[in-house]
Amino acid sequence: MTIYEYQQEILRLKKEKDICILAHSYQAREITEVADFTGDSYQLSIQAKNASQKTVIMCGVRFMAETVKLLSPNKTVLLANATAGCPMAEQMDKELIETVKEQYPGYTVVAYINTTAELKTICDVCVTSSSAVKIVRNLPNKNILFIPDCNLGDYVAKQVPEKNLKLLQGGCPIHARVSSKDVKAARQAHPNAEVLVHPECTPEVLTLADFIGSTSAIMEYAKASDKSDFIIGTEISIAQHLSYQCPKKHFYTLSKNLICPNMKATSLIDVYHAVAGVGGEEILLDDETVKKARLCIDRMIKLG
Ligand code: 13P
Ligand code: SF4
């Protein structure tokens, strides 16, 4: 079967079986084309909450599928490829953060959504890259323990100087390896291009950028801009999607290392197997985890 034939079969099966397919913007184009919704982590959470279908297939990484399950515990939630984890989400576990919390009594624990459902059970509120500044600014407490991404945390701390943020040494290994040298080289190669970066990049890289935003914010900025050339400082797929959406503009990847193997783990065949009922991993969370972890996501949606 060709890619097109697989896509047609997926579209037919998901309609027949009342399935919703959610895809993070880092997914390949052949997957986003069959998805009911594609967006950044925050937008996916909203869609997960509102989807009317009985089954949801997440094309992304494990914490995203867990977030869907937290918001819709009565639905069947499948992670299209069971090996797709997020290394950042696995950096800090519940035991570690319980110990850290003891050292910072009275702090509000703000968890980037890239954390496990288990860890969320002991946190106060979740944030995503697009909602972190707004949510931290609106929290009543001045003292914040921000986990796990220190790059996003540093960015938030600078935007909200009135708050006292304690950061830990976690982060995205993909975005963290982009250097200021990469930015300088890309600017030299494309002198008329604007540099748009994700806040998971290091503070040195962010200082050199023209725009900082989530995956969706970067895409919206580039689409709305009068400029024609852009250097994209996030996973390589965003430059590719933008090239399809704005064929008259030029998009260059900030570094060829910006490839997330976990986000790339899901293939169209995985999605086909999941809709056909012979693939994917069903996400199962116990009632206690759902009850406690959901509070952080609900607060994020309320405040974001
Ligand atoms: P956003 O979807 O918030 O832009 O985050 C990107 C990311 O790394 C997700 O894992
Ligand atoms: Fe995790 Fe980084 Fe990959 Fe996003 S890009 S899934 S944060 S490793």
Image (cartoon, rainbow, N blue to C red):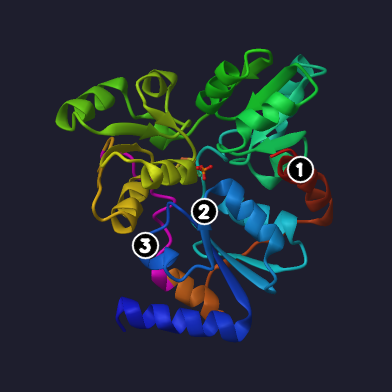
| 170 vs 264: above or below | above
Q: Residue 29 bears which disc, if any?
A: 3
Mark 3 or mark 1: which is in front? 1
Residue 302 tag number: 1
The amino acid marked with disc number 3 is Arg
| C-alpha separation, residue under disc 1 versus residue under disc 2 | 19 Å
Query: Which residue appears farthest toward the front when viewing the image?
Result: 226
Tell me the distance, in whole angstroms, between the alpha carbons under discs 3 and 1.
31 Å
Looking at the rendered structure, the kind of residue marked 1 is Lys
Q: Give neighbour class at mark 1: few <14, some 14-19, many 20+ (Cα, 10 Å).
A: few
Q: Is residue 203 left or right of residue 5?
A: right
Where residue 31 appears, as percent x and y from the top left, is 42, 66
Residue 71 location, x and y as percent? 73, 56
Residue drawn 25% across and 56% down? Answer: 247
Q: Quadrant of the C terminus?
A: top right
Q: Cβ(mark 3) to ligand 1 < 8 Å?
A: no
Which residue matches tag 2?
39
What segment carries the magenta color? 256-269
